[in-house]
Image (cartoon, rainbow, N blue to C red):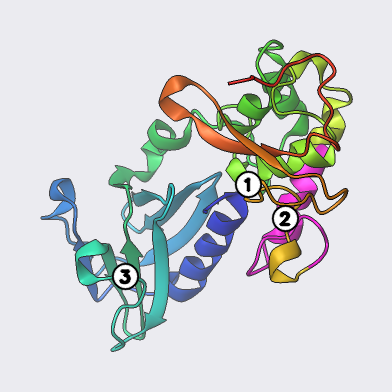
Amino acid sequence: MPEGDTVWRTARRLHEALSGSRLTGCDLRVPKLATVDLSGREVLETVPRGKHLLTRFEGGLTLHSHLRMDGAWRVQAAGERPRGGPAHQIRALLETADRFAVGFRLPVLELLRTAEEASAVGHLGPDLLGSDWDAAEALRRLLAAPARPVGEALLDQRNLAGVGNVYRSELCFLTRMVPWLPMGEVPEPERLLALAHRLLLVNRDRAERCTTGELRRDRRLWVYGRGRRPCLRCGTPVRAAELGPADARRPVYWCPSCQPDPEGLIPTS
């Protein structure tokens, strides 16, 4: 599941493969870009912004993509057969003399003026993996709605960019909070932000995401994806439910022993 660390690694791969080279071929397979050909333009850079990817070209153009749940970019040597899915799932092909990048199942793909990138990413909060990470501004945004559940606030990219569904469950576990705790009641919210920043920094260079410190396949995450299975800390069966606004509900996981709920915040149905 793409989160901020996954997108950061994807941006680095695209940047290393394409930047400084001119496109020898371009095929954007979405209706609104079907006639666009960027061939001949130099690729300047690819940068991540939260969960968004911005590939910039000479002439002031940016290709904006978003992976959402199952999108992916693959980088391969010229002449190879695209890997990553069937051909009908390809949404973008960017070719240089010796490399090409292929985007599969991209739910968002649009061409923007580089000067107008804010129309796509200007709403985002501080980027946890950005060079301009601003913890104070992220904290201000999180606390602006004190009644909102911490599990919702963390996932809102307008507060801070980069935390996804995996990290929100893991962060709540590591700070021993149920995801329904109101943001205004979170003890030491600065510590929560510092932990989020540290986890994404540690994982941005890893092929496999890990929050436990153990890299064995079944022991990398404390609670995420472990519904009804033993908590790795205490052995209590992990529980799962959905959390979020009606149009964006996502599963959340927690341990009822390690994350007590004395105020009865967890929904009963």
Callout 3 secondary element: loop
Indicate left or right for 190 with 154 as reference. right
For residue 107, above or below residue 208: above
**Drawn side of residue 236 relative to residue 221, left or right:** right
Q: Position of residue 266 (x, y in %)?
A: 69, 21
239 in the magenta segment: no
Q: Nearer the viewer, residue 145 or 216?
A: 216
At mark 2, the secondary structure is loop
Question: Alpha-carbon distance for marks 2 and 1?
Answer: 9 Å
Is 197 included in the stretch rendered in magenta?
yes
**Residue 66: percent from left, percent from top:** 41, 48
Question: What are the residue bounds of the magenta stretch?
Answer: 194-214
- Give the residue at the far bottom of this rendering: 79
Q: Amino acid at mark 3?
A: Gly
Q: Residues within 10 Å of mark 2 (few under 14, many from 20)?
A: many
Q: Is residue 70 above or below residue 194?
A: below
- Residue on which disc 3 sits: 85
Name which residue lies at 88% across and 23% down: 187
Quadrant of the rendering where the C terminus is positioned = top right
Q: Which mark is residue 24?
A: none
Examine the rendering and report whether any part of residue 162 can be seen.
Answer: no
Question: Which residue lies at the image location 70% right of the left edge and 25% below the top edge?
Answer: 150
In the image, 244 versus 32, the foreground residue is 244
- Compare marks 3 and 2 and give the one earlier in the sequence: 3
**Residue that mark 1 sits on:** 166
Image location of residue 25, percent across then percent down:
22, 73
* Residue at image mark 2: 221
